Image (cartoon, rainbow, N blue to C red):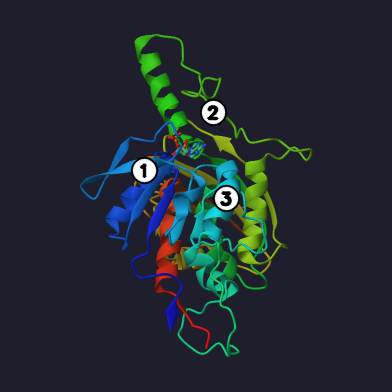
Amino acid sequence: MGRMLPERPNLAIVGATGAVGAELLRILEERSFPHGRLRLLASARSAGTALLYRGEFVNVEELKDDAFDGVDVAIFSAGGAISRRYAPIAGAAGAVVIDNSSAFRMDPDVPLIVPEINGEAGLTAIGCRLSAGDRGLEPGTEVRRPSIIANPNCSTIIALMAVTPLHRAAGSGGVERMVVSTYQAASGAGAGVMRELEQQARDFAAGRPFTMDLLGRQYLFNLFSHTSTVGESGYNEEEMKLMRETHRIWGDSSPRITATCVRVPVLRAHCEAINLTFRGSLTEDEAREILASAPGVKIVDDRAGNRFPEPIYASGIDEVLVGRIRADISQPPGKGLELFVAGDQLRKGAALNAVQIAEMLIHAPQPTPA
Ligand code: A2P
């Protein structure tokens, strides 16, 4: 019995100097992720700098075509253009790419995985089984490793961590309609935008005009529609991702989904108000019970104390917080539910999910062809 990956794979992190890259290093360290050689890759601007990891400085190298020789797993967090150009190169060099960008998420040959939600289905799709066993392979059959696995969009992951267990429990096909309004943090736009938000706070305190180098607008004490391209339908790309990726992860495009995505002046955790309509029925009490045992989810729902999920509670932790759990009073009993979630965009929304996928691959056995 071979394995999908060596027990201590050689790792490359593309975009190591970015916001997600920094969080990846933190999570690999925290979880004592087993690996061999580690390559930190970024643009030529960062080549020659070094990042502290497990008590030692690791040099950052410029991303080039030959960067993936001997690499078993490459985690990409440097944007769609870099993924489109270099993920196939990494794959051809024999690496499994776990891609944080949207470049391959809708490619039917690329699994789109949130381990708690569709990890097993994703592994089955890539020709591997979680339980050891004979796949009935003909002698000489080539068993292919996937070359690219996609991490879903951060808002999609955070919403689905709470909604999927309810969708699966509600019966009669689960969610009929989902309405999402996001309150997205600066981290989703990268480390530079986080720094610009902090700089605007310093500018305000010093009575100076706001620095607007990256966003070209006031962000502090303001909020604005997500700046991804707005299509002919009037929806922006972020909203479309949430809808399309949910359908793909659930393997069901029948739930009707609509979203409004907004950037708020918060550093690193996204919040989302979510309204669900069920085909079957799910009461508020049933929803609470399901969410109480849902993996990776924590209920924060103190009505008396008015304490509910907030970005500062969600920042730096692995769980997605869920609260404001209540029956939608505009719906017949059991038909509608309101939720408010908060999740760390850099952790479960990106870096943690990618590391969990890598851990899943390390533990997944793959039959060796006869
Ligand atoms: P660099 O720091 O050298 O610019 P964020 O999303 O936080 O802005 O991070 C983006 C990441 O992608 C950074 O690590 C950045 O490296 C990296 N990156 C940007 N452009 C390139 C490029 N052309 N080649 C390799 N890495 C890149």
Residue farthest to the right, as pictured? 232
Q: Which of 29 and 353 is in front in this view?
A: 29
Q: Which amino acid does label 2 sit on?
A: Leu
Q: Which percent across, then down, holds residue 15?
A: 45, 43
Q: Which amino acid does label 1 sit on?
A: Ala
Which circle, 3 or 1, is nearer the viewer? 1
- Pointer 3 with pointer 1, Cβ within 8 A: no
**What kind of element bears circle 2?**
loop
Badge 3 or badge 2: first in the primary sequence: 2
Q: Mark 2 points at which residue?
A: 223
Is residue 332 visible to us here? no
Q: In screen coordinates, is 237 left or right of 317? A: right
**What kind of element bears circle 1?**
helix
Label 1 neighbour load within 10 Å: few <14, some 14-19, many 20+ = some
Query: Label 3 to label 1, Cα distance in Å?
Result: 30 Å
Looking at the rendering, which quadrant does residue 217 occupy?
Answer: top right
Which circle, 2 or 1, is nearer the viewer? 1
